[in-house]
Image: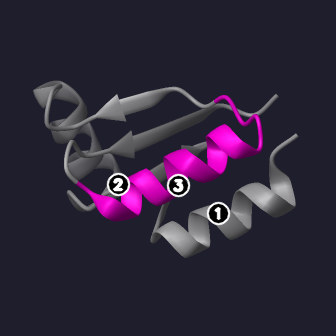
Amino acid sequence: MKDYKLYVGTVCRFCKKVETFCEENNIDIPLVNINEDREAMLELMEKGGKRQVPCLYHDGQYLYESDDIIKYLKENYK
């Protein structure tokens, strides 16, 4: 199993789009809300390079853009 984490924001329609996709497809990825967890926000900015959400962390890589995240999960999540 790959190491996954989904960075989201409190009021973000693109985050909700990815969250809904995960729920509908029984994809269980830990959610990290950067509006509620300052350390997570700083980690995302430092390691991912920007504060943009949604952001899927997987095996040391950071993937942005909701459509790209959904496409990646369709093709790779097992």
Res. 70 mark: 1
Verify CB contact (< 8 Å) between mark 1 and mark 2.
no
Residue name at image x 52 percent, y 26 percent: 30
Q: Is disc 1 surrounded by few (<14), some (14 to 19) or many (20+) residues within 10 Å?
A: some
The residue tagged with tag 1: helix, strand or loop? helix
Numbered disc in front, either 3 or 2: 3
Verify CB contact (< 8 Å) between mark 1 and mark 3.
yes
Res. 43 mark: none
The residue tagged with tag 2: helix, strand or loop? helix
The answer to whether residue 67 is above or below residue 14 is below
Which secondary structure type mostly characterizes the magenta part of the structure? Answer: helix
Query: Quadrant of the rendered structure where residue 78 is?
Result: top right
Say if the magenta span includes residue 59.
Answer: no
Task: Work out whether residue 72 or residue 15 is closer to the camera in this orientation and state it.
Answer: 15
The answer to whether residue 48 is above or below residue 60 is below
Res. 48 mark: 2
Residue name at image x 16 percent, y 39 percent: 42
Task: Work out whether residue 61 or residue 6 is closer to the camera in this orientation and state it.
Answer: 6
Q: Is disc 3 surrounded by few (<14), some (14 to 19) or many (20+) residues within 10 Å?
A: many
Q: Which residue range is magenta in the image?
A: 12-28
Q: Residue 76 location in percent, x, y?
A: 83, 54
Residue name at image x 81 percent, y 46 percent: 77
Structural distance between the alpha carbons of marks 1 and 2: 18 Å
Provide the residue designation for mark 3: 18
Q: In the shown orientation, is residue 67 left or right of residue 71? A: left
- Give the amino acid at mark 3: Val
